[in-house]
Image (cartoon, rainbow, N blue to C red):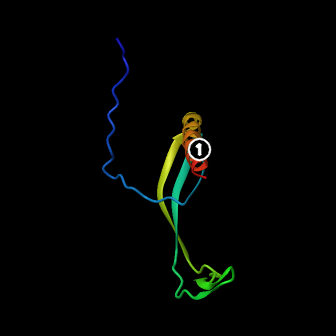
Amino acid sequence: MDDKPIIKIQKASDFKRCHATGMWGNINPFNELVIHITEDIVDLPEKISLVPDPNNPNSYIEEQIKTINNITRIDHAEITIPMSILPSIINWLQLKLDAYNSTIGSNN
């Protein structure tokens, strides 16, 4: 007889989906990793100019934007992770990265 526990997954009432473009964090006094999940939103330029493509005189490309005026950084979530869990998270992330890289490598 197999005595494995049955795990039921349930979304929290305040669950939300977000697009992460960055993260930052530190180790708190309880030796837990505290991570902030962030998203940077760049204001669109007021105008976009088309200029001749130097590589193809028969087409146009967008003129390079010289400066980014405003970036809004949204702090979506703070996650606290016990240090004992980090090796399994790192391993899981490495497996996902390896799978992604093997897919990308097979498409080239």
In the picture of the structure, the residue carrying the numbered disc 1 is: 102
Q: Residue 63 or 9: which is nearer the viewer? A: 63
Helix, strand or loop for disc 1: helix
Q: Residue 45 or 12: which is nearer the viewer? A: 45
Instruction: Judge from the rendering whether residue 1 lies leftward or rightward of residue 25; answer left or right.
Output: left
Instruction: Identify the residue shown where x is 55% and y is 42%.
Output: 99
Name the quadrant of the N terminus.
top left
Instruction: Identify the residue shown where x is 37% and y is 55%.
Output: 16
Q: Quadrant of residue 55?
A: bottom right
- Up-down: is 35 above or below 47? above
Circle 1: is it few (<14), some (14-19), or many (20+) Cα within 10 Å? few
- Up-down: is 21 above or below 98? below
- Up-down: is 55 above or below 49? above
- Farthest front residue in view: 58
Instruction: Identify the residue shown where x is 55% and y is 46%.
Output: 103
Instruction: Judge from the rendering whether residue 11 lies leftward or rightward of residue 91; answer left or right.
Output: left
Q: Residue 99 or 19: which is nearer the viewer? A: 99
